[in-house]
Amino acid sequence: MEINGYTKLAAVVAKPIKHSLSPFIHNLAFEEVAENGAYLAFEVEATVLSSVIDSIKTLDMYGVNLSMPYKEAAVAYVDELSEVAKLTGAINTIVNRNGKLFGTSTDGAGFFKSLPDFSVKDSDITIIGAGGAARAIIAEAALRGAGKITVYNRTYKPELFAAYPGQIDFKPLSDLVSLSGDLLVNTTSVGMDGVSMPISENLVIPENMIVADVIYQPIETPLLRFAKAQGCQTLNGLGMLVYQAAESFELWTGKVMPAEMILEKLEEKIY
Ligand code: ATR
């Protein structure tokens, strides 16, 4: 689609951001759905974050995505927050609603969309890690009525989950000596090196457990290889990356991103 006087802007705001795949995803989506938009990456300093967010209104942008390290700080500069944003205190998306800024996180919704056969309601979910990605997935799971959520983390930080009384069982990672349930998700960076695993190699993963990793580089982490060898269905984090973008895109444009097609193009590009 040709850029012209009517083209509307969306962007990602972060630091660093030059290697982001989001411009590729969103600009392909604008093209595919014939929406006259463009998406850029802005690497900005923390000191200008509030004026950058203010420019969403002055430039009549669709909105922005936020990435590290601004997901928490941006919360202070929006007019309204979604339930999931209130639970996590972090946003990855700002939507310009006629001059009012709405902040939300699409990471958790994107994660569950990347698992089309999985029904969150009443499910038994185990999460490894308690950082930003974990908290987004946990908030979405809790809001959708997961039956049981168990979180294992290297560092004991139960206060992170005070907003979910009785809903989350928080344990030190060293307590992970057996696994059961419907879904295991690794949200830590363990496995990016292609050799490390966040769980012991002596653990048995039940065959009916879906095993997901938020890592997408390498294409298959040691955890996913280990789980596959035990007969589990596995999934890397590239789907989450595309579907969180799809959720933001839909909030901005009202149009559905052709996410499966874009996922295939992205796979061709990076693997
Ligand atoms: P993200 O936003 O991608 O979730 P993050 O907020 O930095 O990243 O969170 C990183 C997560 O990976 C944390 O849960 C971290 O555990 P700690 O809270 O104990 O720091 C976890 N993590 C990172 N390196 C790890 C390692 N070598 N072993 C176990 N957990 C690790």
Image (cartoon, rainbow, N blue to C red):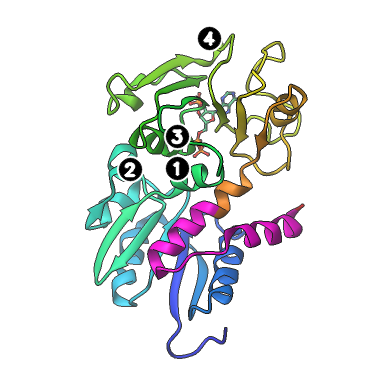
Q: Amino acid at mark 1?
A: Gly
Q: Residue furthest bottom?
A: 5
To which residue does mark 4 refer?
A: 175
Are the residues at dot 1 and dot 4 in contact (C-beta closer than 8 Å)?
A: no
In three-dimensional space, the C-alpha distance between marks 4 and 2, rounded to whole angstroms, equals 28 Å
Q: Amino acid at mark 2?
A: Val
Task: Identify the mark nearer the N-term, 1 or 4.
Answer: 1
Task: Identify the mark nearer the N-term, 4 or 2.
Answer: 2
In the picture, residue 48 is in which quadrant? bottom left
To which residue does mark 1 refer?
A: 108
70 shown above or below 34: above
Q: How busy is the neighbourhood of tag 3: few (under 14 within 10 Å), some, or many (20 plus)? A: many
Label 3 beta carbon less than 8 Å to ligand 1: no
Are the residues at dot 2 and dot 1 in contact (C-beta closer than 8 Å)?
A: yes
Instruction: Please give left or right for residue 44 compared with residue 76 in the image.
Output: right
Which mark's residue is nearer the viewer, 1 or 4? 1
Instruction: Find residue 120 and name its label.
Output: 3
Q: Which residues are magenta?
A: 243-270
Q: Residue at x 77, y 52 (%)?
A: 271
Instruction: Please give left or right for residue 220 compared with residue 98 in the image.
Output: right
Regarding mark 3 in the picture, which secondary structure is present there? loop
